[in-house]
Amino acid sequence: MKTYPDLFALLQNDAEAKRYFDTLPDYVRDQISTRAEGVNSFASLKDYAQNLTRGDG
């Protein structure tokens, strides 16, 4: 699995991760962005988003 320095590099270089990120609710994107250095792969992005949205719905 390819990893990147941070969330912003991930989104810039991985179209699938960018599409996924763009579908997330605003508050989830905001939360993930505040911890950008901890998100360095599509898998970590999905894990983080799922943790944040677990109580939703």
Image (cartoon, rainbow, N blue to C red):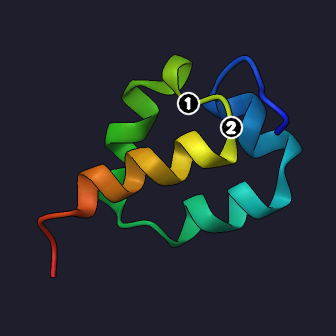
Q: Residue at x 85, y 35 (%)?
A: 2
| Quarter-of-image position of residue 7 | top right
The reply to whether residue 15 is in sight is yes
Position of residue 5 in the picture relative to residue 28 (left or right): right
Q: Is residue 40 left or right of residue 3?
A: left
State the residue at coordinates (11%, 65%). 55
Q: Residue 39 in the image: state x and y as whole percent.
A: 55, 30
Query: From what the image shows, is residue 2 above or below residue 29?
Result: above
Q: Residues within 10 Å of mark 2 (few under 14, many from 20)?
A: many
Q: What residue is pinned by disc 1?
A: 39
User: Could you say where residue 38 lies in the image, as x and y percent from the top left?
Assistant: 50, 21
CB of mark 1 within 8 Å of CB of mark 2?
yes
Question: Which of these two is toward me, 41 or 6?
Answer: 41
Specify the amino acid type for callout 2: Ser
Q: Can you identify the residue that label 2 sits on?
A: 41
In the rendered image, residue 48, in percent from the top left (x then y), is placed at 40, 44
Across and down, in percent, residue 22 comes to 58, 65
> Which quadrant, please, contains the C terminus?
bottom left
Q: Residue at x 38, y 27 (%)?
A: 34
Please report the residue visible at 41 percent of the width from the left and 24 percent of the height from the top: 35
Q: Dividing the image into 4 quarters, which one contains the N terminus?
A: top right
Amino acid type, mark 1? Val
Classify mark 2: helix, strand or loop.
loop
Relative to 25, is 42 on the left or the right?
Answer: right
